[in-house]
Image: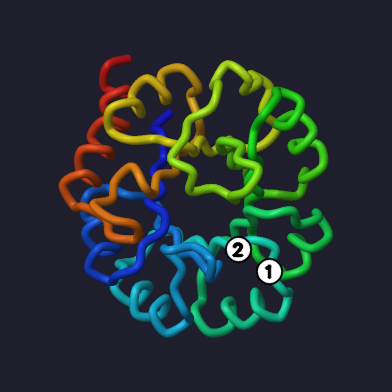
Amino acid sequence: MRTRIKICGLTRPDQAASAVEAGADAIGVVFYPPSPRSVDIGQARELLAALPPFVETVGLFVNPEADWVRRVLDETGISLLQFHGDETPAFCQQFGRRWIKAVRVQTREDIESAYERFSEASGLLVDAYDPNRYGGTGQTFDWTLIPENRPKPLILAGGLNSANVTAAVAAVRPWAVDVSGGVESDKGIKDPARVIEFIREVNRVGKAD
């Protein structure tokens, strides 16, 4: 099975278009103002307008107000929601849109319990734990904590880059990988060459099997 690829934290239309041209299956847009990769609705609309058909567009939120999520959905047309904070299952389900839940991993039980608790999610994103930050840490975590039993697709995130993603995909066999800082020249500024190299390394695993 081919591992799908999401490039997250895009801030410019040209970067989004080039990421898709390089082979990205999905692009992520951050709607969380404390993040240096956050965009407003106008920026998001310009970015999404640069995309061709059949590309998944993901809106990332951290403990948002429900009205803010609805406004983003109404005014941008993103296709998938990603909740990266302490949202409850009931909160995530209320928008009538497919969604994934991010989990900051410390133990195997964190993942197993999240699969049970967020059973209505389309998938589970596993990321490195940081007590002060909701993602974007640039840190990996112990991939051996990820269970073999996965009731829903698993998306691997956390400190991925072209130097370690081949080993990550070979070890974990995730449904998808999610990268942000690992393909940047500066926060929110994707380096096209790093994006191409990252995607090449992900795809190299399948070719080697």
What label sits on residue 64 in the rendered view? Answer: 1
Give the vertical position of 168 relative to 6 (above or below).
Answer: above
> Where in the figure is residue 25, as x and y percent of width and height?
37, 50
How packed is label 1: few (under 14 Cα within 10 Å), some, or many (20 or more)? some
Give yes or no for contact between labels 2 and 1 (Cβ–Cβ under 8 Å). Answer: yes
Give the vertical position of 90 relative to 65 (above or below).
Answer: above
Q: CA distance from mark 2 to mark 1?
A: 6 Å
Please state which of residues 56 and 147 is positioned toward the viewer in this rendering.
147
Residue 105 falls in image quadrant:
top right
How packed is label 2: few (under 14 Cα within 10 Å), some, or many (20 or more)? many
Label 2: which residue? 61
Please name the amino acid that badge 2 sits on. Phe
> Where in the figure is residue 52, as x and y percent of width and height?
30, 67
Residue farthest along the front direction in this orientation: 132
Image point (76%, 49%), residue name: 120
Q: How many discs appear?
A: 2
Image point (37%, 20%), residue name: 167
